[in-house]
Image (cartoon, rainbow, N blue to C red):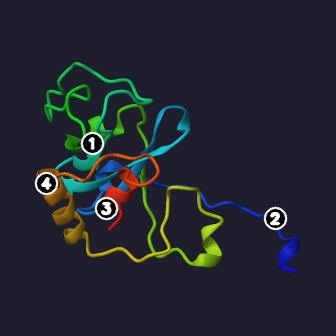
């Protein structure tokens, strides 16, 4: 009987930074593993992602400028293009977002790691992220307009 089988949740899909491909929807945990932060890998160790649009938040801001991408978390808010290290910030593990998860499998995937929808072409994701970098992505809202919404393609 299937009902008696032990439930096993699927693990997050860990990704080695050397294996990232153009257009990958990636994420990492925030401080305390209380939430995930999402972005689109655009190649060359660079990520476009959506950050809070106002001051505050769970992660510490830095007034230091990154020597690689020139990102400064206390100044750059909204859609940002950063190096992979700045994207990772407080974590060193990258995870790959899963698209096309069946409804029957969805409950076994960690929250914030999957979609039942199919993804678009990877180059379309890079194009979309680049357009949003230039034109913005509305005002940040934790529940209705966040980094996962931004990276979802």
Outermost residue toward the top in this view? 63
Q: Nearer the viewer, mark 1 or mark 4?
A: 4
Q: CA distance from mark 1 to mark 2?
A: 37 Å
Secondary structure category for the residue under label 4: helix
Within 10 Å of disc 3 (Cα), the crowding (few <14, some 14-19, many 20+) is: many
- Tell me if label 2 and label 3 are in contact, CB under 8 Å: no
Task: Name the residue tied to disc 2.
Answer: 6
Within 10 Å of disc 2 (Cα), the crowding (few <14, some 14-19, many 20+) is: few
Task: Name the residue tied to disc 4.
Answer: 135
Identify the residue shown where x is 23% and y is 62%. 22
Q: CA distance from mark 2 to mark 3?
A: 32 Å
Task: Name the residue tied to disc 3.
Answer: 24
In x, y percent, where is residue 127?
Answer: 16, 65
Q: CA distance from mark 1 to mark 4?
A: 22 Å
Q: Quadrant of residue 60?
A: top left
Relative to 122, does residue 64 appear above or below in the rendering?
above
Q: Nearer the viewer, mark 2 or mark 4?
A: 4
Q: CA distance from mark 3 to mark 4?
A: 21 Å
Task: Name the residue tied to disc 1.
Answer: 84
Identify the residue shown where x is 72% and y is 62%. 8
Q: Quadrant of residue 152?
A: bottom left
Q: Is residue 31 left or right of residue 55?
A: right
Considering the image in quadrants, where does the C terminus appear? bottom left
Residue 50 tag number: none
Mark positioned earlier in the residue sequence (1 or 2) = 2
Secondary structure category for the residue under label 2: loop
């Amino acid at each position: 009987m299937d009902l008696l089988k032990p439930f096993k949740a699927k693990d997050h899909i860990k990704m080695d930074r050397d294996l990232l491909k153009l257009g990958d929807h990636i994420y990492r945990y925030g401080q305390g593993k209380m939430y995930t932060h999402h972005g689109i890998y655009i190649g060359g160790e660079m990520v476009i992602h959506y950050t809070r649009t106002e001051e505050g938040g769970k992660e510490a801001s830095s007034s230091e400028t990154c020597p690689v991408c020139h990102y400064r978390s206390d100044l750059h808010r909204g859609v940002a293009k950063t190096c992979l290290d700045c994207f990772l910030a407080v974590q060193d593990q990258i995870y790959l977002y899963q698209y096309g998860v069946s409804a029957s499998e969805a409950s076994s995937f960690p929250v914030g790691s999957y979609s039942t929808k199919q993804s678009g072409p990877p180059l379309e994701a890079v194009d979309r992220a680049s357009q949003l970098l230039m034109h913005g992505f509305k005002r940040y809202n934790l529940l209705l307009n966040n980094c996962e919404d931004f990276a979802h393609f």
